[in-house]
Image: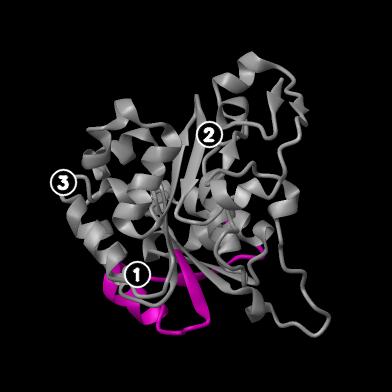
Amino acid sequence: MTFFRRKPGHVLLPGRLRCGHVRVADIGIPPQVLVNIVPRTFANRPPLWRLPVPRMDAHKYDRGHAVIVSGGLASSGAARLAARGALRAGAGLVTVASPRDALIVNAIANLAVMVHPVDGAKELTGFLADRRRNVVVLGPGGGVGAAMRDLVMAALAEPVSAVLDADALTSFADDPKELIAAIKSRSSAITILTPHEGEFGRLFSEVELTKQAQSKLERARSAAEMTGAVVLLKRSRYGCGIAGWPRRHCGKCPTVARNGWFRRCPGGLRRRPLGPGHGGL
């Protein structure tokens, strides 16, 4: 039993597994005190999901055009999973930006998803010049190294929302300040980072130095403040923490380890006209 509101420990693992059913008792505390408390953590529940419903007169571009950057022939599956998830999350159009060596396999394996040949940062910049393509996802199966760094920097230079995952983050392990500076320099476009623990530690060593005194949510918030990005810290054992939007996620889905899950919802919903505070489903 707890009073007034549940606490983060009631919904995040491992506490969630140990406390069983939680009953919230009313002991007379008025809801108005939340104005003074200014809570920063919210349980992820349907009342927060103000998702737009397509209108009868709407066009597919009203729900945005997502661009998923694919890896090479041997590692293209992760991008296809992300593209499929973006469609299911509500994107109006989705295109896999594919290296030419993987173009055929990406085209054959996708039905509702379009495929376009894109090799290297210069071609990606040209492809994103069409402002209807307003979100780009980089990292899944993309490979680690200079080529990925160039792709990321090219994407961040454009006024599109960017979701950076996996290899897009690991490629900056030796120089995270370059990535952080590029993200901070963006004036209005949203950047979403989805690191797991290892990637988080490599990118945010300053935060990691104090992690013994910080909860997962506090670490995610510190990273969000450092970069100006939305940070979704994945932890298979203890759930995830989202920071950088007014509403932080507090919960866990047992299927989060499935390849592509984390980039699907943040990536897909960023393609829809949602305001800050929505997207971490």
The residue lying at 34 percent from left, 69 percent from top is 155
Q: Quadrant of the N terminus?
A: top right
Instruction: Read off the residue under disc 3.
Output: 174
Residue 166 in view of the camera = no
State whether residue 15 is above or below residue 241.
above
Q: Is residue 280 left or right of residue 59?
A: left
Q: CA distance from mark 2 to mark 1?
A: 26 Å
Q: Which mark is residue 117?
A: none
Q: Position of residue 44 (x, y in %)?
A: 65, 44
Residue interval drawn in magenta: 109-136
Instruction: Read off the residue under disc 2.
Output: 257
At label 3, counting other C-alpha atoms closer than 10 Å, the crowd grade (few under 14, some 14-19, many 20 or more) is: few
Q: Which mark is residue 155?
A: 1
Q: Position of residue 220 (x, y in %)?
A: 40, 43
Quadrant housing residue 43: top right
Circle nearer the N terminus (2, 1): 1
Q: CA distance from mark 2 to mark 3?
A: 26 Å
Q: Residue type at mark 1? A: Ala
Q: Position of residue 248 (x, y in %)?
A: 54, 47
Q: Is residue 215 left or right of residue 36?
A: left
